[in-house]
Image (spheres, coloured by chain):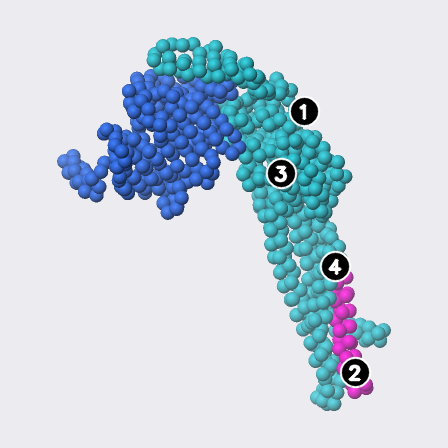
Amino acid sequence: MGLFIRLAWRNLLRNRKRSTVTALGITLGIGFCITTLAIMDGLSHDLITGTTAGQVGHMQIHQKDYLAKRQLQQTITNNAELLQSVRQNTQISAAAARIYSFGYLSKENKSVGVSLFGVEPEHEKNVTTLAEQMTSGTFLSNPTPWPLGQALNDEQKRLDEQLTAQAVAEAFAELDGLFLDNTSTQQQTNQLIDTLAPLPDVPPKVILGVKLAKNLQADVGDIVTLLYETSLGAQQSLQLEVAGTSRQGTDLIDRTRIVFHLQDLQKLLQLPDQSHEIAIKTQDLANVSLLRDAVSDTISAQKQELSVQTWSQLRPDILALIQSNQALMGTLVFIIFLIAGVGVMNAMLVSVMERRKELCLLKALGLKGNNVVWLVTVETLMLTFVASIAGLIMGIALGSYLQQYGWDISQFGEFSLAGVGMTSALKAKLTLDNLLTPVVVMFIIALLAALYPALSAARLIPAQGMRSA
Amino acid sequence: MKQLAFLFLCFASFVSAAKTDLPLGKWIDSAERILRAQTSASVLKMNINKAEYQRDFTLLVLTDDRDEAQKVMVRMLGPALWRGNMTLKVDERISFFEPRNKRTTVMSSSMLASSWMGSHFSNDDLMRETDLAQHYAYSAQKAWDKDTRNYHLVELTPLPSAPVVWGKVLYTLYIEEGRVYPEQVTYFRRKDDPKPERTLTYSDIKNMDGMKVPTMMEMRVTDKPDEYTRMHYQKIKFNTDLAASKFSEQAFL
């Protein structure tokens, strides 16, 4: 063995220029592959964290059919109790309930259709980066003091029916040209509404999407008016105070989203102790599927039909994007290796041809065919080994630079992929896998590339070979 | 030039008369107007029956079609949460008034296609923006007699440039004592759809303000056979001289 290594080493050094060029090919191949894989992993990682930390969380609980229809009434009914049982799982680092709805927001004579998003600020902070997306003002903290709505008692119900009859009578009297004062009807009605859906003591604080705020020309501290439909189907309007603006990165969200405190939106929509979604952050994203089953078991004890889904089930498009990215990069890496492999084969073939005479002599002296194969293979492996070390150094250097500083792509403008707002610097992510895969693959390709030159060397017939030279 | 146009008009009417001898467009127009006349003021109960909820409303609906710009005002009379809510549509402009905060919101006409107060009727249906007597071509499909009624089934296909959402509408109407009554209207999303998307049925003929009119309208969606919205007219006054001020945002206050 030692002899072979010595022989191989000497042969490699004999034509330094050629060996260096071949080695350089391998070095560059491995170095760039490591960098490419690291960038790709960085991108996938960014996409996953962008998805999970930006909006989705690691997994979510919904009422069974909520995702298909997204109806206001399809809620998780015992929100607080469910949250408590979910938070007891030590594998879960945070869980936050949310409510969604739609409305019509206006300031002075400007109106915009908006989406309402109710969150628990103290828990949402631990699940997503919502609180860090603020561009001005302050994030939400406490719910607005707001009395709870109550159903009408029998007496009030009778009064309501009586008022309807009165309103009908008034309407017809009005048509017949009689003037009737209906302010008392409306006053009594307002009292009933105050029982059913009381108003908050002060305008609830909300966070507007940054583009929404700009379109409405609303600044922090301004009062805006929201027209919305409660879960009972009544259209009502309410004044809100702008506490701040946020930039999520996705155009649609920045253009239409208003963030409420969960309890405020529960009262506004009249959905007490209900939510549409519970977003969960786990301790370890890699084990999310296992944990999903555990959470699924926990909540199956509940009376209602709920479903739990991981981020990849909720956003299959992101997963597909990552997979297609990986396939593309894999193909690219394979092509690089193929070129490097052909280079190695060429170099070894030339080196074998050059040394035909001496190989023949060795064979004539008794070196067996498979020993010749071994000799050429060891040469190739040694070359690859040296080049791999250089390639690794290059890959680590380039990769860690990109991991540290990133590749600034902000010149291409604001960047969002499949609705996930991305940072403007593309950051690489070096992993052991990324380092070892190119090296291992390179060795396999080098071995395959050595096979042909080695076999053709082994097949040399000593008598002929020595004479022709 | 005027004479030429007149000649052309004569010719055109001759051609259309030759194609069908029935005044289908006129019938549809009369049937559609039966609850509206020139102006109308009606009190009706709306009963929404959906899988998710049941709701009952009492409404006052005022319409005025005397001018170019159709005007509709819907005021909700009960129950409490809705009482005093008003929706006004003049031409393309829809505004909504909420009495507790005395707040008026002007909405874009894109809201027309969305459901009105969670019912199976769209804003468009309630406000009658799309006129079946205007944007369609008519062809008689079938005619039959039952009791004293002379029934006709008319197929409506939208004119090429018509701003409508339906690909085909089948209109069943009947003529009794010289008056045209609507019986059933089925709406097809596309012309070749085997099943209608929704069906509107008129029934319960009663005497209102000296005229016989259907007082019950029921809308059903084919996909959800258990759901429906009914509008039951309690009282109607036709052709009163409604003041223009009733159809302005000042009427909200």
Residue B175 lies in the magenta stretch = no
Q: Please give the name of the residue rendered at 71% of the width and 73% of the height, measured from the top-left corner.
A: A450
Residue A407 visible (yes or no): no
Q: Which residue is mark 4?
A: A436
Picture layout, residue B178 above or below residue B244: below
Residue in the image at 65% along x and 63% along y? A334
> In the visual, does A211 lie left or right of A337?
left
- Looking at the rendered image, the disc whose residue lies closer to the viewer, 1 or 3, is 3
Q: Point out the tag, 4 or 3, that comes first from the N-terminus.
A: 3
Question: Share a chain, discs 4 and 2?
Answer: yes
For label 3, the residue is A305
Quarter where residue A365 is shown: bottom right
The residue beneath circle 2 is A368
The reply, left or right, for residue A463 in relation to residue A185 is: right
Numbered disc 4: secondary structure:
helix
Question: x, y percentage for residue A35?
Answer: 69, 55
How far apart marks 1 and 3 lie (CA) works out to 31 Å
Q: Earlier in the sequence, mark 2 or mark 3?
A: 3
Distance from the alpha carbon under mark 4 to that under mark 3: 46 Å
